[in-house]
């Protein structure tokens, strides 16, 4: 008799090991749960709420929810999809996401998850916030208009690159990413194009300079297949090669 522990995700048995989250186990089993602030290579953060699922009538974030035996998880009902779509609409109006003018279009997780949930309009009134662009770094440009405050760059620079180049500053709708440098500019940090933090942004907020539109629009990662099939851009070889111009196997 099998002693494997499982929970059910949309009726399908998902095996898991002690300590794994619902998101961990689902992704390992090849089941996609939409997510933006989560990257399977790093510790979960639980801030974007896009990974919300229904567990026995309660809406919870699957990226931080420990899997447990016998759980019944709804990942795709209309109610859950509607909730995710509303969260996405809020993200779109809080920033300035002009997809047709963005180099990341077609390889952007925010855009791809919006397509995946069937988001056709922003629904809410745009904030049109005034946000800066920092082009001071010789190799990297920062478009804060496109930042969704997932915190991945902050966590990865601190925990993986061991540089703590970024911080989250402010509270509520005034929260923003800042550089930890005397001038407040990217150029005065230790950030390098090869840093892991540069490649984890799920949107087009952090982009390499000197490269653009090398993959034609229409042939990009999520132009070809939905995010539910190909997963995170940062983990995908084509995307890594395109956005970092480095060895895709590094
Ligand atoms: Fe779980 Fe962002 S992916 S809260």
Image (cartoon, rainbow, N blue to C red):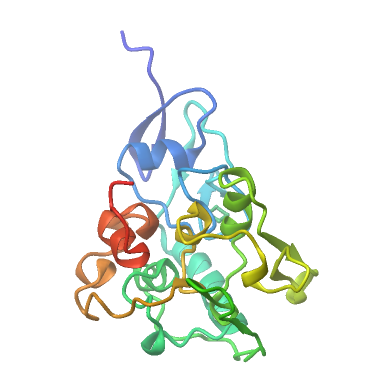
The answer to whether residue 136 is left or right of residue 70 is: right
Left/right placement of residue 23 relative to residue 131 reads left
Residue 9 image point, x, y percent: 39, 42
Residue at (44, 49) in percent of width and height = 74
Residue depicted at x 19% and y 74%: 219
152, 159: nearer the viewer: 159
Rendered view: 166 above or below 70: below
| Residue 126, horizontal then vertical, whole percent | 60, 90
Give percent across and percent down for residue 227.
32, 61
Which residue corresponds to the image point at 57% horizontal and 45% vertical from the top-left? 44
Along the horizontal axis of the image, is 174 left or right of 121?
right
Name the quadrant of the N terminus.
Answer: top left
The one of 53 and 150 positioned closer to us in this rendering: 150
In the picture as drawn, the residue positioned furthest to the top comes out as 1
Position of residue 70 relative to residue 116, above or below, is above
Residue drawn at x 51%, y 74% as measured from the top left: 138
Q: Image quadrant of residue 230? A: bottom left
Residue 115: image location, x then y, percent? 35, 73
User: Does residue 22 appear in this view?
Assistant: yes
- Asked whether the viewer can see residue 58, the reply is no
Q: Quadrant of ligand 1?
A: bottom right
Asked if residue 169 is positioned above or below residue 42 in the image, the reply reads: below
Q: Nearer the viewer, residue 181 or 126?
A: 181
Looking at the image, residue 120 sits to the left or right of residue 133; the answer is: left
Between 241 and 6, the residue placed more toward the observer is 241
How many dots with numbers? 0
């Amino acid at each position: 008799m099998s002693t494997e522990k499982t929970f059910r995700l949309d009726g399908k048995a998902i095996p898991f090991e002690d300590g794994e989250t619902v998101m961990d186990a689902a992704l390992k089993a090849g089941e996609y749960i939409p997510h933006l602030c989560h990257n399977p290579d790093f510790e979960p953060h639980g801030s974007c709420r896009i990974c919300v699922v229904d567990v026995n009538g309660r809406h919870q974030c699957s990226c931080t929810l420990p899997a447990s035996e016998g759980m019944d998880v709804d990942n795709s009902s209309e109610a859950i999809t509607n909730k995710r779509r509303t969260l996405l609409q809020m993200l779109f109006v809080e920033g300035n996401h002009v997809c047709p003018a963005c180099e990341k279009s077609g390889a952007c997780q925010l855009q791809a998850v919006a397509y995946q949930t069937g988001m056709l309009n922003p629904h809410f009134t745009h904030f049109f916030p005034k946000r800066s662009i920092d082009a001071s770094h010789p190799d990297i440009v920062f478009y804060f208009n496109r930042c969704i405050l997932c915190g991945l760059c902050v966590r990865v620079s601190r925990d993986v690159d061991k540089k703590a180049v970024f911080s989250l500053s402010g509270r509520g709708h005034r929260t923003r990413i800042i550089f930890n440098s005397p001038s407040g500019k990217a150029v005065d940090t230790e950030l390098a194009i090869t840093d892991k933090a540069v490649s984890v942004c799920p949107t087009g907020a952090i982009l390499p300079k000197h490269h653009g539109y090398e993959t034609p629009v229409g042939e990009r990662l999520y132009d070809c297949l939905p995010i539910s099939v190909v997963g995170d851009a940062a983990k995908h070889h084509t995307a890594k090669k395109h956005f970092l111009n480095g060895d895709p196997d590094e």
